[in-house]
Amino acid sequence: MYLRTFVASVVLAAASAGVFAQDKVINLYSARHYQADEALYNNFTKATGIRINRVDADDAGILARLKSEGAASPADVILLVDAARLWRAENDGLFQPVKSGVLESRIPVKLRGKDDGHGSQWFGFSMRARTIVYNKQTVKPEDVDSYEALADPKNKGKLCTRSGSHPYNVSLFGALYEHVGEARTEAILKGMVANMARLPVGSDTDQIKAVASGECGVAVSNSYYVARLMKSTKPEDIAVVSRIGVVWPNQKTYGVHVNIAGAGVAKYAPHKADAVQFLEYLSSDEAQRYFAEGNNEWPVVKSLKTSNAALDKLGPFKAEVINVATIGRNQQKVLQILDRVGYR
């Protein structure tokens, strides 16, 4: 039976570190809401005897809660699903540095937070690509083979996306800003707004389904949403997949945008040693396979071999080479551009 310990906000906020210290436990503030992660947490508890008290919210909710709790926060581990939000948490002083030979040997430097000599603020544990999905009946793949192409007038009335200010898009545009500069980024986002088939709404899965139905011709989606539909045995999902094509954007230039899920030890963690042990577990072969095979993400440990037919079918791609912290630093500029061009 999967371990599912949900702690009410008022109880967790009021509980003292002494109460939690009666047994081995970590308090995990998590923005990951994937069913496959239940087995991940359960296996960690079986292997270590350390229970996991989990508080689930979105990235913004977790950051707001941590700031509200301050030094009284019982949080041990902060787990977020976006590079810009990891950077924001680091910038707001919500993490503490972690020095771990295990993590340093397994997690690439570009997928870690700032290291001031006392250890990294956070570590990336899984990757996903922001890919382009198109309707095979109405759109040619060569017409949508880059993020810039989404702003081309030939795609007018065809584009669907979720909200421009959603973290996944803010991170994508933050990377775009780094690659092409402010003026070009603003022109691209303005062109994307002009090409919208409808106002931005819904999740990435909703965008994919809208492309399949013909409501849109092209959309942007995280890769694991596509892979999830590809693995589904539901007739309606099989029909969706049959109508769409997928391209890895910008293969002739800087490469497809890659985002991460990552975690760090909370600044006031009452159980730091156990929290570090949990981070080290997330870098283990076992956990990395869960990310890849359970939630259709790519592991960050490059030497690891995984088995996922959907990811294999999507094929190899050239990824952008950029430090994820850079994406976070660009997010405020991107939000200002989104306001100027009316990208809601």
Image (spheres, helix red, strand yellow):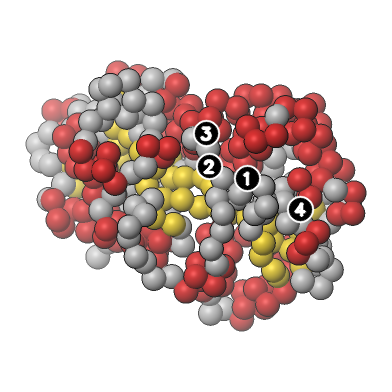
Q: Quadrant of the N terminus?
A: bottom left
Query: Reading the chain from its start, which is encountered first: label 2 or label 4?
Result: 4
- Residue at mark 4: 160
Q: Mark 1 and 2 residues: CB-CB less than 8 Å, in contact?
A: yes
List x then y, in percent, for residue 203. 63, 53
Alpha carbons under labels 3 and 1: distance apart:
19 Å
Which amino acid, by three-letter code, is at mark 2? Val
> To which quarter of the image does residue 216 belong?
bottom right
> To which quarter of the image does residue 242 belong?
bottom right
Query: Reading the chain from its start, which is encountered first: label 4 or label 1?
Result: 4
List x then y, in percent, for residue 298. 44, 57
Say what secondary structure mark 2 lies in. loop
Q: Nearer the viewer, mark 4 or mark 3?
A: 3
- Residue at mark 3: 84
List x then y, in percent, for residue 34. 43, 56
Q: Quadrant of the C terminus?
A: top right
Q: Which mark is residue 220?
A: none
Say what secondary structure mark 4 lies in. strand
Q: Nearer the viewer, residue 241 or 110?
A: 110
Q: Which mark is residue 254?
A: 1
Label 2 Cα neighbours within 10 Å, binned few <14 / some 14-19 / many ≥20: some
